[in-house]
Amino acid sequence: AIPLVVAISSTLGAKNGLLIRDRSAFENARNINSILFDKTGTLTKGEFGVTDTIPFTNDLDENQILKYAASLESNSEHPIAKGIVSSSNEHFYVENFQSIPGKGAEGTVESRNVKVVSPGYLDENGISIPENKHIDKLRTQGKTVVYVLLDDELTGAIALADIIRPESKEAVSKLKSMGVRCMMLTGDNEQVARWVANEVGLDEYFSEVLPQDKSKKVKEIQSRGYIVAMTGDGVNDAPALAQADVGIAIGAGTDVAVETADIILVKSNPMDAVSILGLSRATYKKMI
Ligand code: ADP
Ligand code: MG
């Protein structure tokens, strides 16, 4: 039989916008002393819009760069891809599409090889990034910058802005006051990560973490002696959600994340992560 207090807490959970899939994880939530948030789609809305396009050569103008990039990205589900696609109303046909997980995408558009990639990808492949004060400034404003290559020539950059969820800052400050260390994990660039971490008031952040390394990061924090909750929305967050002591998915996230998590934030509101802790503490204190 289900103990009455647990049945009641499930009802309370539902009232608080929580879908509890794993009871023992929910019970365990009262012991959490650290929480690791994914950035894009979790602390932020994951709704990118293009703010600037910067051509590096005279051969192509802003619209042409966006046209190639948007064509390629129409094959990707990534939030950055969606932002780029909506920036252009002209789309060419794409062949040989391939995503480069955590780094970008590539394909053939109009017989040309097109890549849209992170600065990390350029570093790894020995492609030097020209100094650009305008791009530096965009990054200090928290914008994500991706680079466009045509036939392996760096032709321009696209800057995109996301929106921090209005509840993220309050959730972090509440969790900190409950004695929980608040951290963030992202595949995005260091400067963007720092900007978001400052805005939200996090204790620590990890940037340029590749999808396959996210669960390793959870393990690392566990080996520091922390009981870890992980909150994420993406396909690439699923292994980390599984590794965490309590895996929490954003309701509006991908199916894979939602199916892997122990608890789902139905309203996609980070404040509901605070409710998990409060409810778990209140529920299981009474049972001892
Ligand atoms: P996050 O951890 O913030 O959800 P990801 O690991 O999905 O980020 O992606 C990390 C970085 O890889 C992005 O900031 C971007 O630079 C690059 N990237 C990934 N997918 C794409 C794509 N389809 N188009 C352009 N850039 C991409
Ligand atoms: Mg994400």
Image (cartoon, grey):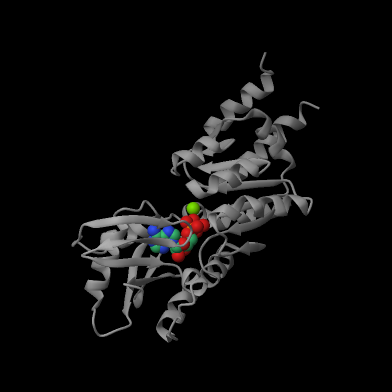
Residue at 66% in and 63% down: 204
How many circles with numbers are drawn on the protein?
0
**Residue 178 locus on image (x, y percent):** 71, 50
Q: Is residue 226 left or right of residue 123?
A: right
Would you say residue 259 is visible in this rendering?
yes
Say which quadrant the N terminus sits in.
top right
Of the pair 190 and 112, the residue shown nearer to us: 112
Q: Is residue 134 left or right of residue 171?
A: left
Residue at 32% in and 58% down: 73
The quarter holding residue 46 reads: bottom left
Up-down relation of residue 100 to residue 140 (above or below)? above
**Residue 231 locus on image (x, y percent):** 57, 47
Of the pair 258 and 131, the residue shown nearer to us: 131
Q: Quadrant of ligand 1?
A: bottom left
Residue at 62% in and 50% down: 215
Say which quadrant the C terminus sits in.
top right
**Residue 68 locus on image (x, y percent):** 26, 66
**Residue 69 locus on image (x, y percent):** 30, 65
Up-down relation of residue 85 to residue 5 (above or below)? below
Up-down relation of residue 258 to residue 4 (above or below)? below
The quarter holding residue 149 reads: bottom left
Identity of the residue furthest to the right in this view: 288
Would you say residue 165 is visible in this rendering?
no
Up-down relation of residue 69 to residue 97 (above or below)? below
